Amino acid sequence: AQSVTQLGSHVSVSEGALVLLRCNYSSSVPPYLFWYVQYPNQGLQLLLKYTTGATLVKGINGFEAEFKKSETSFHLTKPSAHMSDAAEYFCAVTSGGSQGNLIFGKGTKLSVKP
Amino acid sequence: GAGVSQSPSNKVTEKGKDVELRCDPISGHTALYWYRQSLGQGLEFLIYFQGNSAPDKSGLPSDRFSAERTGGSVSTLTIQRTQQEDSAVYLCASSLGGNTIYFGEGSWLTVV
């Protein structure tokens, strides 16, 4: 069975500071990993994904994440937070192939202080 | 359309009534998913349709919940005899394989 753990339901950073949102996964097969962002009263938007190949993946809005198999982690980072980054972020895992469904973490709400 | 479309965007219903939520996936997408997002509960998988295969219903929380997908396109999620704990955002998503799943903006259901 697959699962995702997001450490910290709330993270607060100052504008311009580093953003680090943690995600650890459990999977018995090679995982496909995703980060989604949800702005208030909106649906989920894909930020980035890892399937195979390069373990450092870059996404939209300056975010990136690194797949570390040895640590079973896929932490999301951004060097400099912007006020517009305030949102809820979800990490998700699937087993790959066209029939996988996503298993989501419980989400981390990011606040950005001026 | 360009994205996944869901209707209604907001629904308030009385406890015990049935509700239907509709999803129009991205044109040509073969896979369609329903998720439920409850306050403090994160995203919960409900059901998954892939082409003409039998749907994966393993996430449906009770027999009051059902879903169908007609013609491999539009899907309807039906909740019978709604309860207050059914209040949530119901998210539909679709994909063409490749594991990039695109979400609609959700149907906000409130049971009073």
Image (tube, coloured by chain):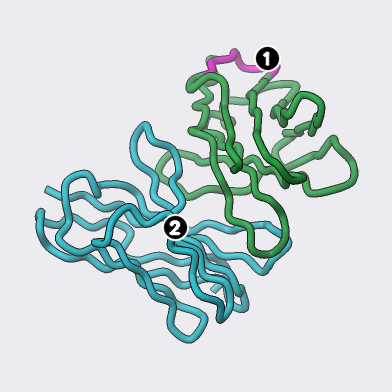
Chain colours: A green, B cyan
In screen coordinates, is B98 left or right of B50? right
Give the residue drawn at x 35%, y 49%. Answer: B89
Q: Which residues are magenta?
A: A11-18
Mark 1, secondary structure of its residue: loop
**How far across and down, in percent of the image, does residue A50 sit?**
77, 44
Helix, strand or loop at label 2? It is: loop
- Which residue lies at the image location 24% right of the left edge and 61% below the top edge? B64
Circle 2 sits on which residue?
Answer: B58
The reply to whether the magenta stretch includes residue A14 is yes
Which three-letter amino acid code belongs to the residue tagged 2? Answer: Ser
Image quarter (top left, top right, bottom left or bottom right) of the N terminus of chain A: top right
**Chain of the residue under the numbered disc 2 shown in the image:** B
The residue that mark 1 highlights is A17
User: What is the spatial separation of the Cα atoms under label 1 and label 2, in whole angstroms?
Assistant: 42 Å
Tell me: A76 left or right of A107.
Answer: right
| Quadrant assignment, res B10 | bottom left
Q: Does the magenta run of residues contain A60?
A: no
Say which quarter of the image contains residue B18: bottom left
Side of A43 relative to B17 (left or right): right
Q: Identify the residue at horizontal 51%, vertical 70% (top origin).
A: B49
Whether B76 is drawn above or below A14: the answer is below
Q: Residues within 10 Å of mark 2 (few under 14, many from 20)?
A: few
User: Where residue B27 appears, x then y in whole percent?
Assistant: 58, 77
**Residue at 71% from the left image edge and 21% from the top image edge:** A80
Q: x, y percentage for residue A111?
A: 51, 21
Q: Nearer the viewer, mark 1 or mark 2?
A: 2
Q: Is residue A111 above or below residue A74?
A: above
Q: Is residue A58 left or right of residue B10?
A: right
Badge 1 amino acid: Ala
